[in-house]
Amino acid sequence: MLLFRNNNSSRPSILAPITLCLCLSLSLSLSLSLSRLRGNMMRRFRQVFTALREHSHVSYAKIATVTGFCDVEFIIIKATAPDDLPLPEKYIHELLKIFSISPSSFREFSLGFTHRFAKTRCWRVALKCLLLLHRLLRSVPEDSPFRSEILWTRTNGLITLYPCHFRDDSSFASDDYTAFIRSYAQLLDEDLNCFVLDMNAEDYQDDEEVVPETLREKMKEVGRMLQILPELQSLIDRVMDCRPTGSAARSFIVQSAMKYIIRDSFICYTMFRREIVAVLDNLFHMPYRSCISAFGVYKKAAVQANQLSEFYDWCKSMGLCGSYEYPFVDQIPQIQIQALETFLNGMWQMTESSSSPSPATSWSSSDDWTITEDGDRQVALVPKEDIVGKWETFEEDNALVRNFEKEMEPLITFDDGENVGW
């Protein structure tokens, strides 16, 4: 290393460290520029390679089916072309027609979908694959084995919707599109486990007409609701996670996919609002553990309502679906949460007091009141009409009982031998 020296001194000049720092910074910036250039070139190469591969797949499928040969895998490839056009409806109708004719085509579709979605690195192809699956799940009949075949494919590890390992290599805003594809795949993965959305409105009306008569039937129905409500809340969370960001929010096919996602959330929220009202109506009849589960659902619904209202406002501002389609989101006040929590705390105290050991008592019951005898005390249990299952206890000692019996004696008494005639 050369050091500059002054004429009047033998010490190194102050310019030497500055020159060294400049050299290091220039070399570092040059290396960063080369690495950035190399990265851009590799990214551009991957984009070109992905585009050529996807277009070659579509061209081969069109040539193979030009003679009228109908193959499920080729239909999937043609329906998921790497362009900015929406999913063609004719391919959905073709697949539904094949499903109605050949039941074995369900397995062929599941394998073809798996191969297409797992191999692609283009966000357009991946999005159209998920949208095609979404549309078919809503279009096939309820008794169709289509869902079972998709579940079979997932169970055998042939396809993984969650966690989704898709990575986009076809655009410069790959992070935005990758995040949206993964969120959409997670939504469909949870939807495969939930059969609630496949019920139509007529089934709901039929269920409402059958009114449970006995308390056991009511509690069985409430138990079913407590299983459905968390699933509906989870689906609503997955819908809100699908909110696109950046360049993905401005894409036409992403917005077309969001319309189907949002309409599913309308069904979920409408069902949730009806079911939670039915659970709260039977809250005083429920066991303590079921009340705790219902309170957890209700407390989460208060937070989720604010998030869902904000999400719907964003969707309206983006022009997704008509404003008349959006359901009214009920805001749950915090005072209702506190009142319900206070009631559950009182129920827990009653449960603890009732679980403590007590001497054996003999019970005699009637329709309106119950009397128990314990030693020399008499206890009357009177039910309250406003809170079911809660009783008040009134104790009376023997003196009060004797006074009551004495008051009930007649005011005038006659001896056995006395003549009562006039």
Image: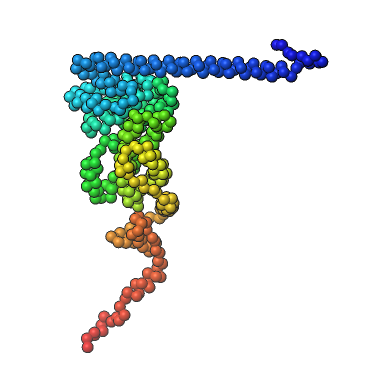
Name the foreground residue: 147 vs 330. Answer: 330
Residue 110 position within the rendered picture, expressed as x and y whole percent measured from the top left:
28, 23
Name the foreground residue: 364 vs 74. Answer: 74
Give the residue drawn at x 43%, y 24%. Answer: 174
Name the foreground residue: 175 vs 288. Answer: 175
**In this rendering, is residue 15 above or below 219?**
above
Residue 98 position within the rendered picture, expressed as x and y whole percent measured from the top left:
20, 24
Name the foreground residue: 179 vs 391. Answer: 179
- Whether residue 148 appears in this view of the structure is no
Q: Quadrant of residue 414?
A: bottom left
State the quadrant of the N terminus. top right
Give the residue drawn at x 42%, y 16%. Answer: 46
**In this rendering, is residue 12 above or below 216?**
above
Give the residue drawn at x 41%, y 29%. Answer: 247
State the quadrant of the C terminus. bottom left
Q: Residue furthest front?
A: 7
